[in-house]
Amino acid sequence: RSASHKKETTNMRVRTLFGLTLAAGRRATSFVYPLTRAAHVSSSGLDMIRNRGLETREEGATPLPGGMTLYVKPAADGKSVGDCPFAHFVRIVLAEKGLEYDLVPSTQEAKPQWLVDDYGGKMPALRHRKECYVDSEVIAQYLDFFFKEPELSVSEGTDDAEAAIDGFFPAMAKFIKHSPNGDEEDKEKQAALEEKLSVLEAHLGKVGRTGPYLVGNGEAFTLLDASMAPKLYALDVCLKEIKGNPVDFDGKYPALRKYMDEVFERPSVKSTSEYGPETVTWGWSSYH
């Protein structure tokens, strides 16, 4: 299929996802309840939510910047930003696009009642004026569809990159969460993680790549990089602080190490990593 056909297919999917019918000039002529809730909310429930001012958009312009609030996991003090890689992903996308927003770390007790009642208290949650989305991938796609500069989605060349990162985070989480370190099960989980790291290493080390990033020739920073950066940051910290530094990145995964160093220094990533290694260690140590 042509790139233009794939791009239009993607646009149709995103329009459907957000319940939007777009006309000339990219105006939103209708808005329905977000997909994350629509499948299991009754019409009476919809009426109640609409009446509470959380939902209905009348005919008008495409969503504009401003009026954004992001609710995220807090750190140990209940007030600072926590270590959630999915919230960090969203913040990287917001930073890349230069979008202003209020950041609200929320304990279970401090969550707004509407977030608990209507979205199960899930976070990260992006409230954009009267709409709210609670899945990091959905939030990222929403932001990238309506706020194009810079565009972080690509219409082709993603298959290899997606295959390279497939299964990485589950393997990482299983290994980091396991205790005690060094037993037979721990070694098996480490081997499973290193299998995924080897796939990433092979992808990033391909001959002919001209840039440092995941997709295509590596020249463009995309949503895949924005999603992977916080997970690799957590891995980097946890291997040192929790697992006893068992993985030789420099020796076995030099291309991946170079990629990590590159994305960690990217302004959108660095400026949103203020929670730091101490908070990452606190968050993941809770499983031990």
Image (cartoon, rainbow, N blue to C red):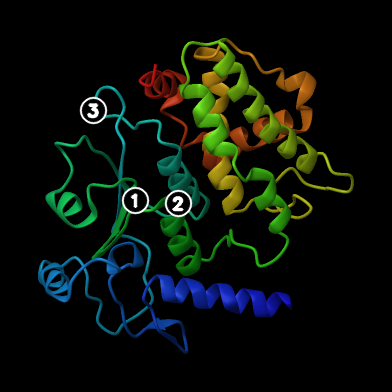
* Disc 3/disc 1 C-alpha distance (Å): 20 Å
Q: Classify 10 Å Cα crowding around label 3: few (below 14), some (14-19), many (20 and above).
A: some
Amino acid carrying label 2: it is: Leu
Which tag, 1 or 2, sits closer to the chain's start?
Answer: 2
User: Residue 137 vs residue 78: left or right?
Assistant: right
Q: Nearer the viewer, mark 2 or mark 3?
A: 3
Amino acid carrying label 3: it is: Gly
Which tag, 2 or 3, sits closer to the chain's start?
Answer: 3
Please determine whether, in this image, residue 187 is positioned above or below residue 258: above
Which of the labelled discs sits on residue 78, or is there none? 3
User: Furthest-right residue in view?
Assistant: 207
Which tag, 3 or 1, sits closer to the chain's start?
Answer: 3
**Residue that numbered label 2 is attached to:** 94
**Which residue is pictured at 61% across the width and 53% down the height?**
222
Where does residue 210 sit, x and y in percent of width and height?
A: 83, 48
User: Residue 23 vs residue 182: left or right?
Assistant: left
Where does residue 3 sit, x and y in percent of width and height?
A: 71, 74
Please determine whether, in this image, residue 165 is positioned above or below residue 107: below
User: Residue 285 vs residue 117: left or right?
Assistant: right
Q: Secondary structure at mark 2?
A: helix
